[in-house]
Amino acid sequence: MIDAPSDPSWLPIPRVAVAQLASGILEYAQQTASGDAFRLPYPANLQLALDRLTLLAWHQGAPAPASVVELLQLAQEPFSDWKIDLTGTDVDPDEALLIYGRPTAACEELGSLRGDVEGEIRENALLRAVMDKSRAHNAPQSYIAFRELLIRQPAIAAMELDARLADPDLALLADEVRQAYVEAPPEAMADGVIRTCGGCSGLRLPLDDDRTWVCEDETCPAPGTTGTDHPASEGVWWLRRELRTFITAPGRAELRIADAIGKLGVSVALWPDFDACDIAVFAERPWVADIKAWRNPVRLARRLRERLFTVSPEAERAYVVIGQEQVKAHPRYVARLRKACPQVRPGQRIVAVSEAEFIGAVKRRVEAEA
Ligand SMILES: [Zn+2]
């Protein structure tokens, strides 16, 4: 029997090529969003991704994108429509990298190669500064107030932000809060107002027809709802994109779960000990959990295989909790996650469960102890 010929060594790995494309798109979006007219050359990652995907296409006998412009067009198509075989890449067929010309959550998860809050906090200079300052002042409540503000107010009127910064907990981090926001982009403005979304309090932006206004947050719980219209002349701030992705989107699940558990009348702490985990429930024999809002279970599994959170010895149970939006979008999410990451199967120190399962388990313990 003859061995199947192995891939030549010069052949790029599809997963790396797609990650590079996603990174390039994120850099490109950052440049175009900063308001400066975009200038060539394109980000190096886009050019490198084009080279790698061209090699792959050539090797597979598939048509290759002829230019970066064509590559960006391809990035708008779901992966199932790609002619280049991307086997081994952690993507779902219905995912695309760009929607309405903006990077998708899938693009964020692929391009940053972390896509999780802990990674972002460690590596994002602003979030690290917030953490260091809160710690130095022994002010966990400032840290919590900062996280809550970013989750509840991805867009905020200038006057309202000033008022919030008068709160003593936030005042400590006033410089960092201001750095977290940028001015709402010009395209968010029409008829003298800036529109927000009732579902997530973020901005609604116009589609190409300039009449349809859509929430730009793919994970918004109620994207069709109309929120407050702010007079543009009074100024509106918008949370920086990476913070919206890594703090706001997963944070909604964190706050919702904490609220639901708080109603059961038990002790619940968000981001205890400066973010040792996302949530700790019960004062004695605590249960701790990390709450994950990754769109794709296979990408999350890869992340968890690389690094699981550290569980303190006094914790009775530890969970990775998948937000209800993700479970709804992917009915077999938890099963796929456990299959791809044996470290979070039942019987392990940390078990992956859905949001509903987690709250249900807490409820059963509350009832048993009553
Ligand atoms: Zn929304």
Image (cartoon, rainbow, N blue to C red):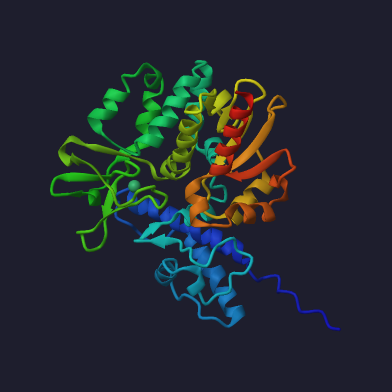
Q: Is residue 133 above or below residue 120?
A: above
Residue 41 seen from this side: no
Q: Which residue does the image show at 29% across and 29% down from the upper left?
A: 161
Out of 229 and 42, give the one closest to the viewer. 229
Q: Is residue 227 above or below residue 25?
A: above
Out of 370 and 363, give the one closest to the viewer. 370
Locate residue 226 relative to residue 61 in the image: left or right: left
Q: Which residue does the image show at 83% across and 83% down from the upper left?
A: 2
Q: Which residue does the image show at 38% across and 31% down from the upper left?
A: 149
Quadrant location, the C terminus:
top right
Locate residue 355 relative to residue 286 in the image: left or right: left
Q: Which residue does the image show at 47% across and 49% down from the upper left?
A: 325
Locate residue 21 relative to residue 192 in the image: left or right: right
Out of 69 and 207, give the one closest to the viewer. 207
Count of labels shown?
0
Locate residue 6 relative to residue 202 in the image: left or right: right
Q: Is residue 276 above or below residue 41?
A: above
Please identify the residue farthest to the right as the structure is shown: 1
Please identify the residue farthest to the left as the structure is shown: 191
Quadrant location, the N terminus:
bottom right
- Across and down, in percent, residue 190 comes to 17, 50
Q: Quadrant of residue 53?
A: bottom right
- Across and down, in percent, residue 18 comes to 54, 63
Residue 220 seen from this side: yes
Q: Quadrant of residue 16?
A: bottom right
- Across and down, in percent, residue 229 comes to 20, 42
- Across and down, in percent, residue 210 comes to 20, 59
